Image (cartoon, helix red, strand yellow):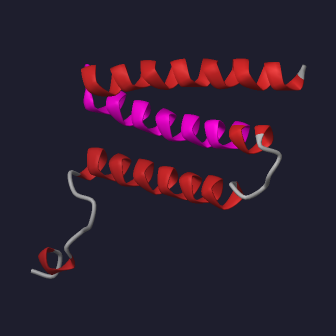
Amino acid sequence: MLDLVLRISLLIIAVSTILYLYRLIKGPSVPDRVIALDAIGINLIGITAIISVMLRTNAFLEVILLLGILTFIGTVAFAKFLEKGEIIENDRNRHR
């Protein structure tokens, strides 16, 4: 029974990822694309976790943590870019 539930949830998350991929390509605006990219990262974490449970191993826990960190850093970088127009600020321009 658990195997069936895991397979169904994996299918649902995969379909959700495909729909987010459509939103990432189609738009209509840059914030929509950023949210879609963040959601794809979260779905990848979910897919990796489900596969880890299906294979009855904890070998993918480091991968899940790495995906979480990369997704968070990417979201923060995109949010900063959308807010200020640059990701890494130049301190030379402030001292003039």
- Against 32, is 79 above or below? below
User: Image check: 15 left or right of 49?
Assistant: left
Residue 73 locus on image (x, y percent)? 46, 57
Residue 95 locus on image (x, y percent)? 16, 82
Where on the picture, by quarter, is residue 31?
top left
Whether residue 27 is visible: no
**Magenta segment includes 74:** no
User: Image check: 46 left or right of 92?
Assistant: right
Where on the picture, by quarter, is residue 54?
top right
**Magenta segment includes 30:** yes
User: Image check: 77 left or right of 8?
Assistant: left
Magenta residues span 27-50
Count of numbered labels shown in the rendering: 0
- Against 56, is 30 above or below? above
Residue 10 locus on image (x, y percent)? 66, 25
Q: Residue furthest front?
A: 55
User: Image check: 96 left or right of 51?
Assistant: left
Residue 53 locus on image (x, y percent)? 79, 41
Residue at the spot 66% in from the left edge and 61% down from the top edge: 62
* Image quarter hosting the C terminus: bottom left
Q: Nearer the viewer, residue 32 or 67?
A: 67
* Image quarter hosting the N terminus: top right
Where on the picture, by quarter, is residue 4?
top right
Whether residue 85 is visible: yes
Residue at the spot 30% in from the left edge and 46% down from the top edge: 83
Main SS class of the magenta portion in the image:
helix
